[in-house]
Amino acid sequence: VFQQQTTNTVEEPLDLIRLSLDERIYVKMRNDRELRGRLHAYDQHLNMILGDVEETVTTIEIDEETYEEIYKSTKRNIPMLFVRGDGVVLVAPPLRVG
Amino acid sequence: MEVSHSVKERTIAENSLVILLQGLRGRVTTVELRDESAAAGCITSVDAFMNVRLAEVTFTDRQGTVSHLDELFVTGRNIRYVHIPDEVDIRATIEEQLQAIHRVRYFGGRDKGRREFLYAKQ
């Protein structure tokens, strides 16, 4: 609806995101957050609408005695989320573990 | 359907996903802010810059303290997420908003009324 040019070829980086519409994607955000969800819509600011989202927030705690870094992550699920583009760092296909 | 009175804002909204948020007017949902606080309330208005006005707000701050506010204004820059209620049909909402803008733009007919954008001069 918003596309100025509705071509099928990949001409600019945003077109690569267009290829991921309706697919599950991985979004890395600022403040150590990650989202995994289905991309329903996006715009030039990288504002996005994601469905069936899992948000992972990672924190690092320093053990006071051993000074080792303990990585902790908190997850939560949201059925449909509008994400403001200025928080987005990168967009990629979902990472396959193992 | 409330459309902005500003040509600039109409154009910005029409060309970005903010238009979906504008269609959420009257819906109760949660807005999560950049500073980890969250505001749950009824969306009164959203402008082209994503500034949001909410009413009857349950505000949870970073520490988890809950308070109640009759009205809240959130600057667009401070928004991280907006939860979309399950019952919202995203495509239909966006199309309704676009139609509202087009009704305003073409008010008076195609050849009458003040044109928002200039065609090549004949």
Image (cartoon, coloured by chain):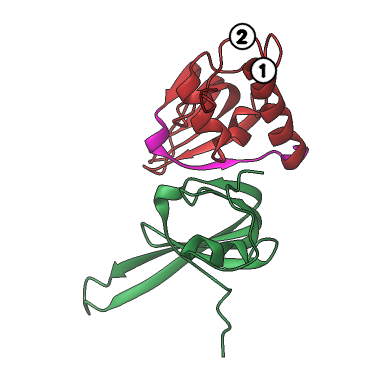
Q: Are marks 1 and 2 on the same chain?
A: yes
In magenta, the rendered stretch is: B75-90
| Camera-side residue of A8 and B33 | A8
Q: Are marks 1 and 2 in contact (CB under 8 Å)?
A: yes
Q: Quadrant of residue B57?
A: top right
**In the rendered image of this protein, does residue B102 appear above or below residue B65?**
above
- Supply the letter of whichever chain is red: B
**In the rendered image of this protein, does residue B78 appear above or below residue A85?**
above
Q: Is residue B112 left or right of residue B45?
A: right
Q: Quadrant of the N terminus of chain B?
A: top right
Q: Is residue A40 left or right of residue A14?
A: right
Q: Total number of numbered labels?
A: 2
| Camera-side residue of A62 and A64 | A62
The colour of chain A is green
| Camera-side residue of A69 and B112 | B112
Mark 1: which secondary structure? loop
- The amino acid type found where label 2 is placed reads Gly
Q: CA distance from mark 1 to mark 2?
A: 7 Å
Determine if the magenta segment contains residue B76: yes
| Residue at point 56%, 11% (across, down) | B114
Furthest residue in direction bottom, as rendered: A98
